[in-house]
Image: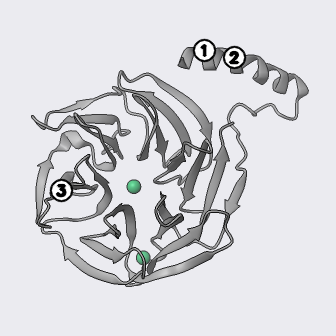
Amino acid sequence: MITLKIKTMKPLFMIFFVCGSFAFAQDQKVPEIKLTGFSHPESVIYDAGTEYFYVSNMADKTEGDGFISRISRKWKEQDHTWVTGLDDPKGMVIKKNKLYVTDVTQLVEIDLQSGEVLKRIPVEGSQSLNDPALDENGVLYFSDLAAGSIYKMNEAGEIKEWLKSSELERPNGLFLTPEYILVAAWGQEQNGNFLKIDRKTREVTPISKNGIGNLDGIQPKADGEYFISDWASGKIYTIDMKGNLSEEFTSEKSSGDILFQQDENKLYLPMNLQNEIWIYNLN
Ligand SMILES: [Ca+2]
Ligand SMILES: [Ca+2]
């Protein structure tokens, strides 16, 4: 499937090349829309229940300057400072009318209707929390990039370190399948890999072998295929469970925790250094 795609796209590139002005067109895909008004955004999610997009903004270094934006589907309503008073909010997940946001060493619980901060749960031993993800039963897992660990919160709201290992290669993005926790790793001295962790044995296996980049987001694309983002290069890849990797397009440096909207076939990229959300139409 991937090979086919590359084959069918090559003649197009040749035409661009011949035309001259599009000599580098194979690397450049233009965003359909650039949403502005953000401050070092890390993550964008969509909630079908409320029909809003939520964007985490790390902002600058001042304590309490981080915030969450809430944006309506057609961009009419753009409440950039919907929730304020956070530090460096990163990943987000929605569970039972609550928005959970990782904020450095805390898991912050926010009322999805009112935007009120309900709880700030300190996570013992954490250093730099990153991406939360839910399993099929609504159990919450979240990564700690700097500590090289994954935490788990049980139904009672108790948080425990689930796995700590250098094999996690500084874990950033997480995605849960019934069998595995998939990890987009930032990397230590070398580029991070796309990893799988067996949920029963907790064995870590790299799916890619030679390092891909400073990986950040994971989004399911199709059965057994995922979009992953490399923060450092701005490249968006498709990868499958066997490690077959194909480049979709290159945005710019600092593409963070991406969102794929399957119904409209669009990818949403939080661009940290550009302070924007870039939306790419894949059609
Ligand atoms: Ca901040
Ligand atoms: Ca992330």
Q: Which residue is mark 2?
A: 8
Q: Residues within 10 Å of mark 2 (few under 14, many from 20)?
A: few
Badges 3 and 1: C-beta atoms under 8 Å apart? no
Q: How is the image coloured?
A: one colour
> Disc number at residue 151?
3
Numbered marks: total = 3
| Cα distance between the residues tagged 3 and 2 | 43 Å
| Cα distance between the residues tagged 3 and 1 | 39 Å
Badges 1 and 2: C-beta atoms under 8 Å apart? yes
Q: Which residue is mark 1?
A: 4
Residue appearing at x 29%, y 35% in the figure: 195
* Helix, strand or loop for disc 2: helix
Which quarter of the frame holds ligand 2? bottom left
First in sequence: mark 3 vs mark 1: 1
126 lies above or below 250:
below
Any part of residue 65 in sight: no
Residue appearing at x 65%, y 14% in the figure: 7
* Helix, strand or loop for disc 1: helix
Q: The C terminus appears in which quarter of the rendering?
A: top right
Please state if 201 lies on the left or on the right of 226 as rendered: left
Disc 1 marks a residue whose amino acid type is Leu
9 lies above or below 78:
above
- Image quadrant in which you'd find residue 85: bottom left
Residue 128 % position (x, y)? 28, 64
| Cα distance between the residues tagged 1 and 2 | 6 Å
Please state if 264 lies on the left or on the right of 158 as rendered: right
Q: Residues within 10 Å of mark 3 (few under 14, many from 20)?
A: many
